[in-house]
Image (spheres, helix red, strand yellow):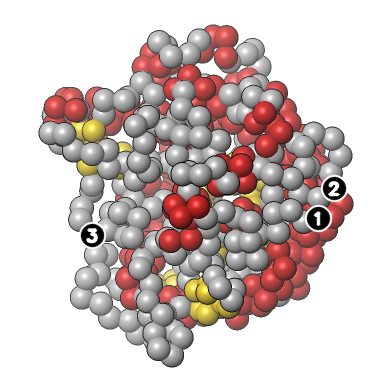
Amino acid sequence: MTVTDPHTSAGTLAGPARRPFPPGFAWGAATAAYQIEGAAREGGRTPSIWDTFSHTPGKVVNGDTGDTAVDHYHRFREDVRLMAELGLTSYRFSLSWPRIQPTGRGPAVERGLDFYRALTDELLAHGITPVATLYHWDLPQELEAAGGWPARDTAYRFAEYAGLAAEALGDRVSVWTTLNEPWCSAFLGYGSGVHAPGRTSPADALRAAHHLNLGHGLAVGALRAALPAAARIAVSLNLHLVRPHSAHPGDLEAARRIDAVGNRIFTGPMFDGGYPADLLADTAHLVDWDGLVHDGDRAEIGRPLDLLGLNYYNPTVVSSAENAAGLPRHDGHGESPYSPWPGAEDVAFHRANDDLTAMGWPIDPSGLTDSLTDLHRRYGLPLLVTENGAAFEDVVGPDGTVHDPERIRYLAGHLAAVADAVDAGADVRGYYLWSLLDNFEWAYGYGKRFGIVHVDYATQARTPKASARWYAEVIRRGGLD
Ligand code: FCB
């Protein structure tokens, strides 16, 4: 199948394929528990912060919730069959903490684990390598009631849950990622409040960031203790590819601040030995870092990883406030009077270009190449693209099919960007497109469709879009043209 589109930005619009990817490259798709599973009250599962948040009027567009989602809990065999038909070699999903450990404490619930045993058995039977994410934002509500991520104890609870999951599933899951996008958990959850639990305190957001880091490090220790030596452990970060709007010193300073509180707040302690001094200075008026960071935390957080997961959607262009002339905050992270950027509240965000997805996110694959090559240069770790994809206003044709050339163009451009990074020497081991299925897109509800497989929410019928057929062909050929 050849796809032509005059609007290609990467110039490599995709078709039949002679741009090979490295041998063993993982061709994947990603999902998350709350976005697809449904069965919110089955199998002993209790509410997570996203159940509470989505049931709070005004928090999610249209009052949508994940109560039913796309019913993957009951339809996982059909969904795995679809993955196999598309030729996926790997699948990244998340474990629902409140399904496995409903109160966030104590022993695991076997029924919860059984669901993931059955799912992973099904994947393995189809030759698909499972990649389990421990935390994709669904904190058990009881732990939020006890203080949530701003409370230090939550980090220890997370490590305990990680150990339980690894003991139960370590015989069949060999690739694990601890946290998905801790920046969103901390700064959208506790800063701007557009994500669960919807708190709006800059100090709590910073405390949450530290405890997510600590939880990650403690969880790496718990995973290593429970898993076979060959298991590989990662984290999935939505590192912002920050570009200054101009070479003006004010814009360079804005970029430095956003890089600090958007990226180095995680990569600093995970890979560079501690929190960067400029971040501590930028936020010293908001939080007592000396009290927050205990002796020994740095060593925990800095435990070695085997892989680094990058989630990339678009670049982030920033300037000083003076260079923004009253622009709305185009940071792509939702509308809120509260900033998710503690210590950088006056930084202005610009759109990188006007070629936008249905989320209003600018399309710029070069940012993915730049991110991967930069991460390779800095840390030398094998890399995974653990998320990348796009929502568009899909139209179901009279014959029931979805022709989605814009999504194909997005994916082709970004896969070419991965290939460029590989050519430049980055050790990229896999690509997980977001997402396999249309699903509950957090505060946007079901209105934003990211899937390569269309879901009719009235009937739960799954129909692969043209982009799914295209991706299957890329996989079959082992790369792009
Ligand atoms: C990422 C999330 C994922 C999905 C995509 C569109 O930030 O990790 O769950 O919502 O954005």
Q: How far across and how far down the image is residue 118, in percent?
A: 79, 65
109 left or right of 392?
right
Count residues near mark 2 (Cα–Cα under 10 Å), then give few for <14, some for 14-19, many for 20+: some
Question: Which quarter of the rendered picture does the C terminus lie within?
Answer: bottom left
Count residues near mark 3 (Cα–Cα under 10 Å), then give few for <14, some for 14-19, many for 20+: few
Mark linked to residue 109: 2
Mark 3 lies on a secondary structure that is loop
Mark 2 residue type: Val
- Please name the residue that numbered disc 1 is placed on: 43
Q: State the residue in front, 312 or 98.
A: 98
Q: How far across and how far down the image is residue 295, in percent?
A: 64, 12
* Residue at mark 2 to residue at mark 1: CA–CA distance: 9 Å
Question: Which quarter of the rendered picture does the N terminus lie within?
Answer: bottom left
Sequence-first tag of 2 and 1? 1
Mark 1 residue type: Gly
| Relative to 399, residue 288 above or below | above
Mark linked to residue 448: none
Mark linked to residue 355: 3
Q: How far across and how far down the image is residue 333, in percent?
A: 38, 43
Residue beneath the point at 48% across and 60% down: 446
* Residue at mark 2 to residue at mark 3: CA–CA distance: 47 Å
Residue beneath the point at 43% across and 61% down: 447
* Residue 251 seen anywhere in this rendered image of the structure: yes
Q: Is there CB contact under 8 Å for labels 2 and 1?
A: yes
| Relative to 85, residue 371 above or below | above
Q: State the residue in front, 98 or 297.
A: 98
